[in-house]
Amino acid sequence: MEHSFESAFAYSPTIRSRAPGRIEFIGNHTDYNGGMVMGVAVDKGISIAASPRADNTIRMATSHGDAPTSADIANIQPLAGDASWCNYILGVVKAMQDEGMKTPHGFDIFVDSDLPSGAGLSSSAALELSTGWALSAMFNFPLDKATLARVGRKAENTFVGMPCGILDQGVSAFGEKDAIVRIDCAKESFTTIPMPKGLRFWVFNTMEKHNLVESLYATRHKECMDAFALLREAGCEAENLAAVAPDFVRKAKLPATLEMRALHVCEEHRRVIAMGKALDAGKVSEMGRLLCASHRSSSTLFENSTERLDALVEILGATQGVVGARLTGGGFGGAAMALTLDSFGEEQARTVCDAFEKQFGQRPSVFSAAAGAGARLCQ
């Protein structure tokens, strides 16, 4: 990183930070509906090297780009085209300014990643949080993990334009080695649950790249909001969609599509609660059942899966050593997550990839991930 920064800017960085990507373990689209969600910070992510400048210029460079992209600290506006990746950095600057953490001058920042983009692992949140920690160190801002997560979410909601909840940023901020992060999104409270021994995560990318800003994510968000508004009109007193009882949804006679979206959210919320109990009790088979039920609901009720994701989850479910599998992230492409026994290894992963390639003519990328540490400054 130091050499890359020096190559881009011709001097050495003073600040280094890193934030992990995340696997959405269970709780698909429950976060912005006030529900419970679980995620895992993986041992891959985004690293940043940065240094303050004496003027108002922000220069941003990446190992995947060419010349640095520049912006003015006094006039931050979204960028388009090949420079649009910079919006995750600029959005954090703007969100921190809105919270009273005004950067007094510009900075240079270099970004490197070992996290595959477009696979549903939230490289965007990792970039937001690593940027936030770097800025807090650079300008001595008072920043804790919860504030950092909220700043990242605000950057994505208001600057990037993606109406996500706090799952991605919360997991990246609060991740711990060998632990699952549980978030109560209504209260925005964060806790961790130890991972049972003898289990691992594998991520299989369909290579069907998604772009949530331009996908049906915003449509699903609106459908959930519309469904909840109609449920309130029908006499529901719940504070959010996730808290509505499934039986109430069925009796409310919503339009068919909105009923499907609402049922997915409120039942998925309850699956997350059940998963917490299964984790506490070490009931591995129940964990697998809940993961598979989550994917079926995402596919049939929320309709954010794809033919390739469904096929991949089916292949995984029939493979020895797989506890359970489901899509991970917003959906509409991207990756499937498999919770496996330690006995599942490279040989089994190749078998899965062979079966998928035979069906679709394209081989998925795959990697094994362990639960790792959350966003942090680096020495």
Image (spheres, grey):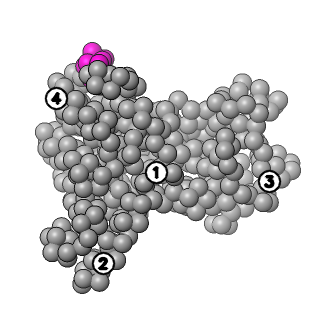
Taking depth in this image into account, of 80 and 23 the one nearest to the observer is 80
Identify residue type, mark 1.
Ser
Between circles 4 and 3, the one closer to the viewer is 4
Q: Position of residue 81 (x, y in %)?
A: 66, 44
Q: What amino acid is found at the position of numbered circle 4 in the picture? A: Ala
C-beta proximity under 8 Å, tags 4 and 3: no
The amino acid type found where label 2 is placed reads Leu
Q: Taking the image as drawn, is residue 235 in sight?
A: yes
Q: Is residue 49 visible?
A: no
**Badge nearest the viewer, 1 or 3:** 1
SS category of the residue bearing label 2: helix
In the rendered structure, which segment of residues is drawn in magenta? Answer: 346-354
Snapshot quadrant of residue 4: top right
Residue at mark 4: 318
Check if residue 349 falls in the magenta segment.
Answer: yes
Residue occupied by mark 2:
230
Which of these two is toward me, 372 or 242? 242
Numbered mark located on residue 72 in the image: 3
The residue that mark 1 highlights is: 215
Separation of disc 3 and disc 2 at Cα? 44 Å
How crowded pointer 3 is (Cα within 10 Å; few <14, some 14-19, many 20+) is rated as some
